[in-house]
Amino acid sequence: MVSFNLAPAESESQTRAYDVIVIGGGPGGASAAIYTSRATLKTLVIDKGLSAGALGLTHKIANYPGVAQEVTGAELLQTMRDQAKMFGTEFVQDKVLSVDLASDPKVIFASEGTYTARAVVLATGSMGRATGVKGEAEFLGRGVSYCATCDGAFFKGLDVAVAGNNDEAVEEALHLAKFARKVYLLVPTPGLKVAADLINVLDEHPVIEVRNGIRLREILGEQLVSGVRIAPRNGEESVLPVRGAFVYLQGSKPITDFLQGQVPTNEGGCLIVDEQYQTQVPGVFAVGDLLCNHIKQAVVAAADGVISAMAIERQLSGRATLRPDWS
Ligand SMILES: Cc1cc2nc3c(=O)[nH]c(=O)nc-3n(C[C@H](O)[C@H](O)[C@H](O)COP(=O)(O)OP(=O)(O)OC[C@H]3O[C@@H](n4cnc5c(N)ncnc54)[C@H](O)[C@@H]3O)c2cc1C
């Protein structure tokens, strides 16, 4: 049985009712809200803060289609939110603590209010990773990154370090090698845990230098990253001068704690959605980085949000059984 003891005490009359509540106002949530509001559904986005999510904290973004100039992630996100507001979306800055998704309407408990909705979009992203390395949180977006596809081009001609021992770390090192002058792949274990043919590719690569058994101890810098402190197991520390540190030591963690197990997941803990992004709880949709998508990009999250919004519009207007527009 699920308990909702984190919810503030509020009477029925204080509860605000919406057609759609979007939890998380990143590109996934904001895009969903643009489409549901435009479809005249009363929409509320509850979000912790403009710079609390992956896009909001991104220093520079240069690959969002249609936005040619370099902008900060927060600027791009604010534009999306303004567009949603223009169509009638309401935003509240608050943290969702728990939900009751079995009830009709569904109930959302945030720290400063309780809300109900006929449909819910979960869009809280996957910034729930624990930052383990000293300096990692401090320099995130200022030289520390978890996404070579996003940030690789900013390191053209510079030296960078990639820390990790898995497929993701290798894939990212290979991508970075297209831009960087030198890529140090710092492997904390005695060897990489990847297929032998990949190890051969790395061994022969002119830009990538694999250093096995090396721990990343600290990320150094002032405004931006200027180096990393590294050490072999039980060995002496040294400083590697690099301008970027791509960390793949822990993997990202979808933010789902407030769901308290109410939405089924697969064995890996990922929410299961259908092709319209509906979870196994009817009327509850999930989009963006929260899903275990291989490609974590703002435009992908935005597209997920749009597809979910169009499905919600069909569902709430009693047209759910009609074939989707694109089929
Ligand atoms: C450093 C960095 C650089 C990147 N660079 C690029 C790039 O150049 N190009 C690109 O396309 N992509 C880039 N990405 C990836 C991109 O930012 C993400 O794929 C995208 O932001 C995912 O969108 P989202 O809406 O799923 O989640 P997010 O953008 O993470 O938004 C989630 C939102 O949910 C809110 N939230 C979380 N929990 C709660 C809660 N309990 N209650 C209320 N609100 C909550 C947060 O405040 C946040 O606003 C980058 C990511 C990082 C980390």
Image (tube, grey):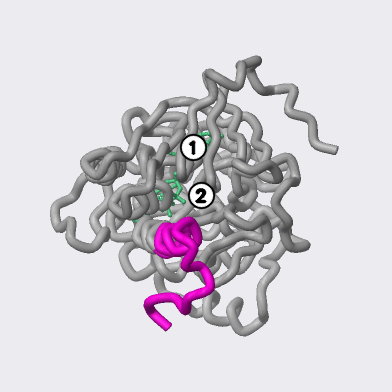
Q: Is residue 223 magenta?
A: no
Identify which residue is drawn at 45% across, 33% down: 47
Residue 309 within the segment the image draws in magenta: yes
Q: Which mark is residue 53?
A: none
Q: Residues within 10 Å of mark 1 (few under 14, many from 20)?
A: many
Distance of mark 1 from mark 2, alpha carbons? Answer: 36 Å
Q: Secondary structure at mark 2?
A: strand
Q: Say left or right for 212 vs 294.
A: right
Asked whether mark 1 and ligand 1 are closer than 8 Å, the reply comes as no
Q: Nearer the viewer, residue 222 or 77?
A: 77
Residue 219, which numbered label? 1
Start and end of the magenta stretch? 307-327
Regarding residue 183, the answer to whether it shows in the image is: no
How many discs appear? 2
**Which secondary structure, mark 1?**
strand
The residue depicted at 51 percent of the width and 68 percent of the height is 320
Residue at 49% in and 63% down: 318
Question: Between 43 and 228, which is closer to the camera in this rendering?
Answer: 43
Could you tell which of marks 1 and 2 lies nearer the N-terminus? 2
Q: Quadrant of the C terminus?
A: bottom left
- Circle 2 residues within 10 Å: few <14, some 14–19, many ≥20: many
Please name the amino acid that badge 2 sits on: Val
Front in this rendered view, residue 102 or 6: 102
Residue contact at pointers 1 and 2, CB within 8 angstroms: no
Position of residue 221 relative to residue 55, above or below, is: above
158 displayed left or right of 240: left
Residue under pointer 2: 121
Q: Amino acid at mark 1?
A: Ile
Q: Position of residue 324 (x, y in %)?
A: 44, 75
Dividing the picture into quarters, in which one does residue 141 lie?
Answer: top left
Q: Looking at the image, which is closer to me, 77 or 186?
A: 77
